[in-house]
Amino acid sequence: MEDEEMEKKVQQYLHRKGFRLTELALQEERNRLSTTSLSDVSLSRSDNDPARYYDGYNKLRTWAYNSLDQYKHELLRVLYPVFIHCFMDLVAEGHTQEARSFFHTFREDHELMHSRDLQKLEGILSPLHLEEMDLARSLRENKFRIKLCEYSYELLLQYLQKTQALVMLGIINERIIFEVSAGQPSLISDDADVVALVGTSKDLAKQINQKEVHWGLLEDSVEERMEKALSDSDKTEAESKDADAEDNNKKKSSEGGKQGGPLKKLKKDKVVGATGKNNKSEASMVSAAPRVKPELTLPATPVEVEQSILEDLRNRAQLNNLALPSVSFYTFLNTHNGLNCSSISNDGSLVVGGFSDSSVKVWDMAKIGQPAKTSSSQGENGSSQGEHLSSTSEGKRPYTLFQGHSGPVYSAAFSPFGDFLLSSSSDSTIRLWSTKLNANLVCYKGHNYPVWDVQFSPVGHYFASASHDRTARIWSMDKIQPLRIMAGHLADVDCVQWHVNCNYIATGSSDKTVRLWDVQTGECIRMFIGHRSMVLSLAMSPDGRYMASGDEDGTIMMWDLSTGRCVSPLAGHNSCVWSLAFSCEGALLASGSADCTVKLWDVASSTKALKMDDTKAGSTNRLRLLKALPTKSTPVYNLRFSRRNLLFATGALSLGS
Amino acid sequence: MSIVPKETIEVIAQSVGIPTLPADVSAALAPDVEYRLREIMQEAIKCMRHAKRTVLTADDVDSALSLRNVEPVYGFASGDPLRFKRAVGHKDLFYIDDREVDFKEIIEAPLPKAPLDTAVVAHWLAIEGVQPAIPENPPIDAISAPTENKRTEHVKDDGLPVDIKLPVKHILSRELQMYFDKIAELTMSRSNTPIFREALVSLSKDSGLHPLVPYFSYFIADEVTRSLADLPVLFALMRVVQSLLRNPHVHIEPYLHQLMPSMITCIVAKRLGHRLSDNHWELRDFSANLVASVCRKYGHAYHNLQIRLTKTLINAFLDPHKALTQHYGAVQGISALGTSAVRLLLLPNLEPYMQLLDPELQLEKQTNEMKRKEAWRVYGALLCASGKCLYERLKLFPGLLSASTQPLLRSNKRVATNNPNKRKSSTDLSASQPPLKKMASDVLMSSMSSAATMAGNMPGSMDGFSTQLPNPSMMQASSSGQMADGIAAAGLIRRDQGGNQHAQMVSTVLRQAWKEDQDAGHLLASLHDVFGEAIFSFIQPPEISFFL
């Protein structure tokens, strides 16, 4: 009332004195003030119920977490300031008990990012403390600045107006300044200073990444034994080596058909045999990795399988930036846009395709590889039709058809020894098939939404799945219930990959982050932030130290698991990176993309540089592109290095699209 | 506020049977509709990505809807792309062209072919990092390689491994080297063997030859300049060019600038081959057609290609100091480019040129047999070119003949006075000339007229026409004198026919008096002036159709 009288007097005074302009300015200013206060919906603090903070914040939080992926990270930024101000308001009003319970209920959300602040604020117990503590005072005196894009801001306003969340609206009006920018939402990685995704401000994400990761390899693995044997044989019978290699070659040629293209192999074998020394020094890169104990009980490897692995290891072609791999490409013809995924068995003899008509088809390339080889010289179409005709005339398909799913099949994976096959589908199930019996063995139900990806562990028996329900799950073949559920991603988990030592899995998500989870505890122990779009593919280096991830834009990032930092971003592809694969000794990374190329990257040089200068080599260091292999209008769906370092690739010929 | 305007909500409400929607309802619905749309799209894009596609289909939207437990939208199959049509009068308003389909039609339609079953084929994408040149792999782009080599990374002083790419030599596989050597050897020494023909087929069909193209173009340019005196080699080289041009896997455009001069050389060079008996005319015709095909194929990409070519040719044609062989080549080159080139370039210069050529044609003025023979060749080529042009014009404007009445009538007198002269000269020629020369000229005439009938048979196909031109009678000309009489007789008969035709035509011309298209009429008249009645053989076929 006093104010109004005063204003009236002032106005009269101005009027009398003839200060017209000043008078107008005053009026204008007053009008503006009144309109803003209208829009700000002045907060009525008459209602003194402390529970309204709890309710309001809880609702806002639920809403933000369920908002559109694209705008989610922006909306989540708003939560933290609202949270601490709710808390401080509660304290200021004297509801100490309620304030504490509120704080403890929601502190977890912000723990990762703001744990230091939270520790300080936790100590506030009375209104007096608010006055005394520097942090609290500065928080209450200063406003938060949050950048939002237009649509996020609009969404927030709509929510606040619709729900009549007056408490929240009051706090937001009072404490936060929005910098609204036109266009698309800003990228998480762009503004490190601004509070980003939960637990993901650049320096504070480190805290989650403080946890220890034992990225070493498993002790007593076949490879290790192999190496020992090699070094032994090196010492004792260095001179008989050539004869040995010769022997291998003969053996090779007899079983050559298995690999689909054995001719070249022989040549390479010889090279390897001759450069045994080189082989050892390169392999030491892998062997230098520390050893860790397995956390899971691992299945035993059959003796004959072990034998064949040893054989493969002995005949491995050595790859580095000078010796590039041979690439055998399996092209799917006549897919009619229905091929969703494909995968190759470890020795390249089996190829599986998952189709949108719910079917899973397996081709045995060792069987049809031979006729395909001979007729391929006549051109692609001729051979395919010829094959097709011959097979139909015999009344048999050239592939094995697995039917059982009731929705598009989004992923398929062979067990390490090729005897089992997993497929995941939009019907939210995972099915286990036997390639020996050609039958469905188990149907795993657990996910509630489409399962995007499924991967066998490197030793078999266990497998991991990723789903639209925002979880990743660990399963074992003999149980129909998942063993672990990894929850934490803010959007779909799109891809999953096992660490070489089977103690960890990595997941890539539509929330643009990659996370590393401990299989035993189910905890998230690393979070990798930097991608600007949905993560589509993951690969682990064979020495267990690095991980590569590829996204929708065509960017590939190389991460150091121990530090949780990006070693080098690789730009080269201009469309989705569907698949990534490390060569067996980790010197090369192959990437397959929707832009119809396979690219080979030099890993060894960049990681060496990193070892040399661990602190300095940051994101400035770039991986070197060694070679781009274009295909003929065939997007590359899957890549796999065989144990002998032959690279297999699959893709569906898509003409005219 | 939102991208979905309130009006849209109102329209939708009307379409589902709510005539008046309160304004605040639509205002409240609009943002929610937008949100739901965005949500569905977000899920649909996820489905698209997991189906490893980069194009959103109706199926993706359906699966997104089913993810949200919403009934999918029926009626949009992903089989074929949706046809959107622009609404008339609106810039960015589209609708789906949804035609009514007759059930009967669908039921009675024959069953479509069953789609082929999925198959997997294997091939080598790379062998030890090198892509083999097989049809399954995309053609190797040799052009982009040099630009990559230019990029060198700078040495940093922190000791990081740097790779400095040296100016890499173009690496040619051993197989390709052998292939090139073999082709070169065949071209140079054994161009008349069947194996050379096989080699040409291989050159025109095989993929993976692209890395050799620079070598071939250099080889051809080099050898053409070196072996101008060796006709078989020149011919073989031109055949190699032809095969390379035909190969669909070879990207020859960047090397055209190297190949064109060689080809033009083979058209307008003063001397090709060293012996008199060498049939360089054939090579000139062949190369002319080759160049014309290049112009047709790449003319749209390189605008100045044809301009430069015609400039060269017309210069050769108009320079009186150039040899007649060169003139012949130029005429053939222009004529191969099509009738419009002839009309624009040759016809305006025809009359002055004929004055130049005339003395060369006549026995009394030109005593050198060789020269006279060459002159008759040029005459024949000119006649053929302009006749073809006339033929095309007549085909375009069937009424043109009648239009040509007036000028023809005017010129008829001159024709009458002119013609006897000419015929006399030619009969003189046949009387006094030794059989060989007479035969040469007559054969020329006869071949012209036969070529004209040929053109009548397959109008528009220039290739057929021009390759027919050096027809057997030419070859026989030099060899057998006995054939000459027969051919000459044939020629005379033809000429008589021409005369009859002439008479007939004059009568038709008299009967119909039209006064249109004077220009085109002039063309016939002036051509008649220049060539006499020989030109009428070119209007024979349409004439006949005109009367029958």
Image: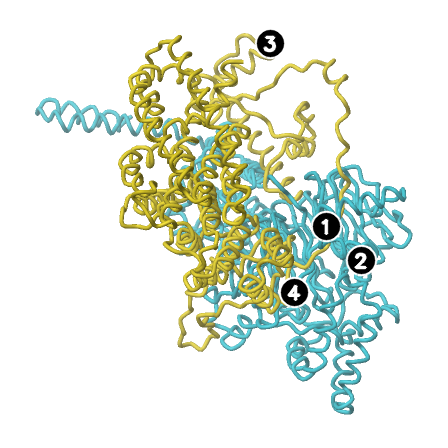
Chain colours: A cyan, B yellow
Query: Separation of disc 1 and disc 3 at Cα?
Result: 48 Å
Question: Which chain is indicated by disc 2?
Answer: A
Both on one chain, marks 1 and 2?
yes
Q: Residue B391 in the image: x percent, y percent?
A: 44, 27
Return the residue nearer the eye: A131 or B67.
B67
Q: Which residue is mark 3?
A: B17
Q: Which residue is mark 1?
A: A342
Q: Nearer the viewer, mark 1 or mark 2?
A: 2
Q: Which residue is mark 2?
A: A370
Both on one chain, marks 1 and 3?
no
Q: Is residue A140 above or below residue B494?
A: below
Q: Do the residues bearing badges 3 and 4 touch, measured as CB atoms within 8 Å?
A: no
Q: Nearer the viewer, mark 1 or mark 4?
A: 4
Query: Separation of disc 1 and disc 4 at Cα?
Result: 23 Å
Q: Amino acid at mark 2?
A: Gln
Query: Separation of disc 2 and disc 3 at Cα?
Result: 65 Å
Q: Residue at x 39, y 18 (%)?
A: B400
Give the residue furthest to the right.
A437
Callout count: 4
Place residue A428 in its image quadrant.
Answer: top right
Question: Which chain is indicated by disc 3?
Answer: B
Q: Nearer the viewer, mark 1 or mark 3?
A: 1
Q: Amino acid at mark 4?
A: Ile
A652 vs B512, left or right, is right
Q: Which residue is mark 4?
A: B127
Looking at the rendered image, the quarter that the N terminus of chain A falls into is: top left
